Image (cartoon, grey):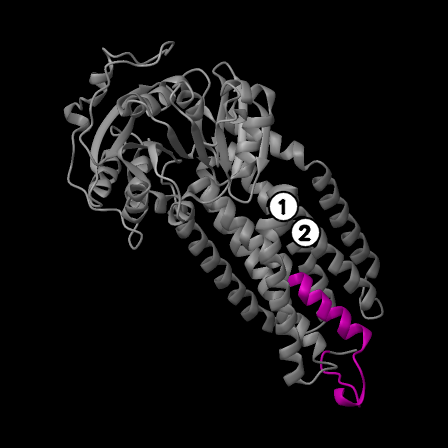
């Protein structure tokens, strides 16, 4: 059957034909697979490179451009359209399905080539996906008039995109992980090729070669799917150096816990959150300057800090009646409550009857009517992207101020005043913009270097005379030293970080990017 062949009857004179139904179903699958590859590349780039808005924007833009290139190239496919469609499906299946695994391995073994490989793969996969729909439409044109053809193809295309856009963050990645999700949809692309092989078996030349290619592609994808955990381990063992004792992908982040010479270490999206060897320095510095200064805090809130380390320090005060831990990711609080070794690190603090865990977005939680708190500990990751950056804006601190009691203190972990000096003082300026006093201080944590914190309060900060017994780092005599800033960390003029500009994310990327470049 030639490309120009057409039936004698009009579409209105008959019902849908099996070939048409099968190809339209293939459009649904093809659209779903194409979007998975696009989302995988964008999500991985935001995990590994930070700044999610920039990464998603550039990846999606590149992918759409590549699809346009593929659509344009489809004009050069004149004959044997089913054969071309079958070959393209197999190439998309292998390259797109393996994309997450390739990028994970590249980040671990050749990090300098990661960006080039990322955008190169996006261009290749996008171009191939851009070829798919035009070829399907030209094959269907044999039996469907143009008006119905366009509407039906686009309907199935959009439905496939809708289905996967919902399933990807809520079901696929949490249940399968990024690598297996990519391989699963690669397998589905290969299955479409097998279906095309069957549908057009009477038109295809060298059908044996096509069948062998389909078999080998399916076998390779199935083998990779079975061995996906080994691929992940191979990449992450190289990246993290130490042995991985726990790893999980949630809708919000990649959680990895390692164990080595420095004890356990927690990484979120590849960024170190604590090291067992010196985490006590970080958490004692975060919690005790405000808890001891408040006097006798009764109601305390912790925003972030799902590892329970800050809660452990808070519970050292007998006056505390309740601690509300607001952590977005339930996987974090579940891990540090139920995993025996990790729960031991926080002294099983999350199982205390005084502790209430709320798994929700802290920004939304503050917007709701609620209790006032004597102390609020803000322990978020650094502002590497706009999703986290909103938690460092004047809008967030204005909400925080409304939940702080008249004599209360809030403390915010605030990156390094030495490495990211302008970022650090941007937070101080932003806190002051909502009418709160900002009292900066810093501590040396070997795993992080010189690290900064800022106390926010309505009243002037008063240095405490005593601290709880049994601390390993802080003492009343050394506490004042933390509030002294040498010249290379002294205050510099900065702007207010607002939701409308999120200047902090850009500043942070620039300052830490210089360090990573060296």
* The quadrant where residue 415 appears: top left
Height in image: 10 above or below 160? Answer: below
Q: Which residues are drawn in magenta?
A: 3-30
> In screen coordinates, is 261 left or right of 217?
left
Location of residue 93 in the rendering, given as x and y in whole percent from the top left corner: 67, 53
Task: Look at the numbered disc 2 and give the secondary structure of its residue.
Answer: helix
> In screen coordinates, is 192 left or right of 368?
right
Height in image: 464 above or below 434? Answer: above
Q: Which mark is residue 186?
A: 2
Residue topped by disc 1: 98
Q: Please check the rendered image and state whether residue 24 is part of the magenta-colored stretch, yes or no.
A: yes
Height in image: 336 above or below 197? Answer: above
Q: Please check the rendered image and state whether residue 64 is part of the magenta-colored stretch, yes or no.
A: no
Q: Is residue 80 visible?
A: no
Q: Earlier in the sequence, mark 1 or mark 2?
A: 1
Q: Residue at x 56, y 65 (%)?
A: 70
- Contact flag, marks 1 and 2 (Cβ < 8 Å): yes
Q: Residue at x 66, y 34 (%)?
A: 229
């Amino acid at each position: 059957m030639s490309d120009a062949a057409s039936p004698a009857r009009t579409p209105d004179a008959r019902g849908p034909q099996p070939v048409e139904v099968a190809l339209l179903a293939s459009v649904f699958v093809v659209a779903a697979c194409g979007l998975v590859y696009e989302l995988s590349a964008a999500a991985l780039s935001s995990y590994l490179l930070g700044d999610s808005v920039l990464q998603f924007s550039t990846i999606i833009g590149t992918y759409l451009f590549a699809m346009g290139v593929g659509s344009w190239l489809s004009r050069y496919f004149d004959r044997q359209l089913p054969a071309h469609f079958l070959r393209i499906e197999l190439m998309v299946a292998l390259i797109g399905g393996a994309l997450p695994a390739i990028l994970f391995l590249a980040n671990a073994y050749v990090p300098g080539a990661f960006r080039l490989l990322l955008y190169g793969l996006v261009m290749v996969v996008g171009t191939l996906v851009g070829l798919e729909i035009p070829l399907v439409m030209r094959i269907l044109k044999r039996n469907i008039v143009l008006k119905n053809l366009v509407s039906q193809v686009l309907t199935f295309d959009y439905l496939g995109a809708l289905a996967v856009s919902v399933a990807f963050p809520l079901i696929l990645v949490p249940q399968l992980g990024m690598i297996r999700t990519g391989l699963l949809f690669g397998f589905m692309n290969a299955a479409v090729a097998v279906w095309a092989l069957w549908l057009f078996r009477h038109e295809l030349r060298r059908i044996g070669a096509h069948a062998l290619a389909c078999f080998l592609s399916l076998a390779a994808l199935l083998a990779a799917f079975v061995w996906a955990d080994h691929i992940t381990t191979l990449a992450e063992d190289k990246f993290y150096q130490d042995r991985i004792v726990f790893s999980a992908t949630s809708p919000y982040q990649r959680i990895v816990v390692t164990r080595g010479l420095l004890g356990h270490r927690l990484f979120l999206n590849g960024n170190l959150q604590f090291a067992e060897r010196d985490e006590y320095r970080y958490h004692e510095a975060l919690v005790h300057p405000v808890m001891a200064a408040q006097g006798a805090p009764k109601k305390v809130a912790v925003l972030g800090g799902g590892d329970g380390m800050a809660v452990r320090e808070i519970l050292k005060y007998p006056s505390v009646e309740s601690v509300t831990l607001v952590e977005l990711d339930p996987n974090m609080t579940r891990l540090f409550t139920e995993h025996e070794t990790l729960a031991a690190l926080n002294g099983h603090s999350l199982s205390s009857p005084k502790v209430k865990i709320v798994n929700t977005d802290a920004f939304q939680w503050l917007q709701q009517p609620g209790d006032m708190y004597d102390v609020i500990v803000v322990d978020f990751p650094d502002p590497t992207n706009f999703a986290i950056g909103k938690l460092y804006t004047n809008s967030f601190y204005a909400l925080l101020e409304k939940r702080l009691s008249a004599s209360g203190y809030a403390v915010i972990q605030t990156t390094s005043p030495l490495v990211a000096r302008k970022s650090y003082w941007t937070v101080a300026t932003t806190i002051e913009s909502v009418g709160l006093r900002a009292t900066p201080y810093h501590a040396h944590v070997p795993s992080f270097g010189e690290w900064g914190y800022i106390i926010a309060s309505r009243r002037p900060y008063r240095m405490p005379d005593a601290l709880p017994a049994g601390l390993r780092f802080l003492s009343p005599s050394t506490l004042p030293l933390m509030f002294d800033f040498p010249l290379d960390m002294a205050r510099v003029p900065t702007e207010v970080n607002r939701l409308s500009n999120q200047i902090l994310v850009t500043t942070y990327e620039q300052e830490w990017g210089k360090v990573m470049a060296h």
